[in-house]
Amino acid sequence: MESANACWADTLAVFDLETTGIDVDTCRIVTAHVGVIGIDGEALERREWLVDPGVEIPTAASLIHGVSTERARAEGAAAPTAVAEIIAALTGAAARGLPIVAYNAAYDLTVLAREAERYGLPGLPGPDAVIDPLVIDKAVDRYRRGKRTLSATAEHYGVRLDDAHDAGADAVAAGRVAQAIARAHPQLAAVAVGELHARQIDWCRDQAESYQSWRRRNGEPEFTTSGAWPVR
């Protein structure tokens, strides 16, 4: 029986991808991490993938995550196999009742969904218990100045991130940021994870609409952006 004080942030699955680019419809997975962190942010489980994406990795992407086309081809798993394993790992974590944390989840989960479609694989069921520290942080601290990158947000919440753009480091840091937000906002920690998931759908839509309006007012009258979450 769960403690009356238990909350969604106590034990979390953490997920991150590094890819070939930024377009969710065309980019491919290069590295991935699925792990579990405990109540103090300690890494309890971790699984990582290096993937041969089947396409050239642009130099700009390699400079970010450090994986070249040559290394991916020589050492990486076949993309269909890796994608199936990543989906299985996330499905298993969800089946254990663990929320899945991903920073800017709509990017990672959409890329994963597109990869599944590309290789004719079953996608990740749901998902219906996702925690996105980017969306939540924007909702609870809307007017804070500065960037909302993972590095900047981790620094704001006092979370150490030494190796940004390493899938494992980013995934664990995102989970720890989610836990820090829960500590800073006890009213959110008390919300059931399903309800928090539903709130994030609304928050992300509202945030996208606000950003779209701002861009249109500032010289881009035809700018559009998607507020769909957690998969576009």
Image (tube, rainbow, N blue to C red):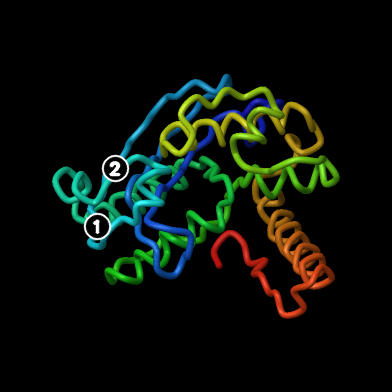
Residue 105: which numbered mark, if any? none
Q: Is residue 158 above or below residue 101?
A: above
Residue closest to the eye, 86 or 171: 171
Residue at 55%, 23% (x, y): give it. Answer: 41
Residue 179 point in image, percent of width and height: 64, 30
Q: Is residue 161 above or below residue 212?
A: above
Q: Whole-percent x and y of residue 36?
A: 45, 32
In the rendered view of the protein, which quadrant contains the N terminus?
A: top right
> Dot 1: within a 10 Å radius of its alpha carbon, few (fewer than 14), some, or many (20 or more) residues?
many
Question: The C terminus is located in which quarter?
Answer: bottom right
- The answer to which of marks 2 and 1 sits earlier in the sequence is 2
- Mark 2: give few (<14), some (14-19) or many (20+) Cα within 10 Å: many
Report the residue at 77% width, 67% height from top: 215
Q: Position of residue 88 (x, y in %)?
A: 33, 51
Residue at the disc numbered 2: 49
Badge 1 marks a residue whose secondary structure is helix
* Residue 79 image label: 1
Determine whether the residue tagged by mark 2 lies in a helix, strand or loop: strand
- Horizontal side, residue 203 vs residue 114: left or right: right
Tell which of 62 and 154 is nearer to you. 62
Residue at screen point 42% across, 39% down: 167
